[in-house]
């Protein structure tokens, strides 16, 4: 079999773009609008090379009809998602989580004699967000954390991102917003690399999850707080409405949803109560 080496000259036709765009949407809910054709073309060019395929038509037919294409499907999702994140990203949201939402929920739980916390980092990327959540919880509870049953579920559609999250080792740039005392306390440094300490890693359970898998998403129940930041940008309005309605069901009454600071539930859902925090917004299930 010849080795094809597609170059930048290989272009995606409008028809093939629509076929691939619809295929991706059907299998993940991720939507590429018409003006994102060149972006999809660029991101999938490496998949042509990896599979020794001469053009995007052949790639589509492989995805569509090859019974062994399930592994490639996950590589496709790696290619079309962006894993740009960092620790303590969007500080006003983290502050709202640390000083308002989390203490409120913990107080309510403690009053009922239920020292249980369940959180979900939905779209956790390389793990920066769930580990940040763990650090914040440890800072609040200190040694009393042993009295609590705490689990942070962290999910993503990108296997590549999850592999990085499991390694839990990061560079200085990723930790640029981390206060020096927090960095010293919760990371082990080796040269220019920093690894999250075990007491934080143990709070986080990483798992693969495609939000298009409605049966599995419905099983994600009983959460006190959900972080789903910069995920809705991948969906069209219909998919956003379906997914946000599911997130509402995933939350306990009184629970909070945090989405990206540039995202909004306006015209998406009226089920949540909009909560104004200093410099940040949250959505509460009453």
Image: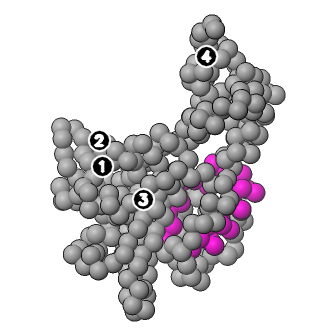
Residue 201 in the image, given as x and y percentages of width and height = 32, 57
> Residue pushed farthest front?
67
Q: Please provide the residue range marked out in magenta.
A: 225-251
Name above or below for residue 236 compared with residue 172: below
Residue tagged 3 = 205
Disc ID at residue 171: 2
Query: Which residue sits at x=26%, y=70%?
Result: 139
**In front: mark 4 or mark 2?**
4
Q: Residues within 10 Å of mark 4 (few under 14, many from 20)?
A: some
Give the x, y percent position of residue 110.
38, 88
Viewer-nearest residue: 274 or 97: 97
37 and 190: which one is in front?
Answer: 190
Q: Position of residue 78 (x, y in %)?
A: 54, 38
The answer to whether residue 23 is above or below residue 115 is above
C-alpha distance separating marks 2 and 3: 22 Å
In the image, residue 157 sits, relative to residue 254, either above or below, namely above
Q: Is there a contact, CB below 8 Å, between mark 1 and mark 2?
A: yes
Q: CA distance from mark 4 to mark 3?
A: 36 Å
Q: Which residue is mark 4?
A: 52
Q: CA distance from mark 4 to mark 2?
A: 33 Å
Q: Earlier in the sequence, mark 4 or mark 2?
A: 4
What residue is at 44 percent from the left and 54 percent from the top? Answer: 206
| Quadrant including the C terminus | bottom right
Q: Secondary structure at mark 2?
A: strand
The image quadrant of residue 182 is bottom left
Q: What label does residue 258 carry, if any?
A: none
Inter-mark Cα distance, 4 to 1: 38 Å
Task: Using the image, tell me which numbered label, if any, was put on residue 175.
Answer: 1
């Amino acid at each position: 079999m010849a080795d094809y080496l597609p170059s930048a000259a290989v272009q995606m036709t409008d028809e093939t773009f629509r076929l691939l765009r619809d295929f991706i949407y059907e299998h993940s809910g991720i939507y590429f609008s018409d003006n994102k054709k060149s972006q999809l073309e660029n991101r999938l060019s490496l998949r042509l090379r990896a599979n020794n395929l001469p053009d995007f038509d052949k790639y589509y037919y492989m995805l569509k009809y090859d019974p062994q294409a399930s592994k490639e499907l996950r590589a496709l999702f790696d290619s079309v998602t962006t894993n740009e994140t960092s620790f303590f990203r969007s500080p006003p949201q983290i502050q709202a989580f640390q000083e308002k939402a989390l203490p409120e929920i913990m107080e309510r739980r403690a009053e009922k004699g239920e020292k249980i916390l369940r959180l979900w980092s939905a779209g956790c990327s390389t793990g920066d967000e769930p580990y940040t959540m763990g650090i914040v919880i440890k800072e609040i509870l200190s040694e009393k954390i042993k009295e609590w049953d705490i689990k942070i579920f962290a999910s993503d559609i990108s296997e590549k991102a999850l592999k990085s999250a499991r390694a839990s080792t990061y560079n200085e740039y990723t930790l640029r917003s981390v206060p020096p005392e927090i960095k010293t306390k919760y990371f082990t440094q080796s040269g220019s690399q920093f690894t999250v300490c075990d007491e934080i890693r143990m709070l986080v359970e990483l798992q693969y999850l495609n939000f298009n898998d409605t049966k599995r998403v419905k099983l994600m129940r009983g959460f006190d707080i959900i972080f789903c930041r910069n995920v809705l940008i991948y969906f069209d309005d219909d998919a956003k409405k379906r997914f946000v309605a599911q997130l509402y069901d995933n939350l306990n009454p009184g629970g909070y949803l945090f989405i990206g600071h540039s995202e909004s539930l306006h015209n998406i859902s009226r089920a949540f109560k909009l909560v104004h925090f200093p410099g940040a917004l949250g959505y509460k299930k009453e």
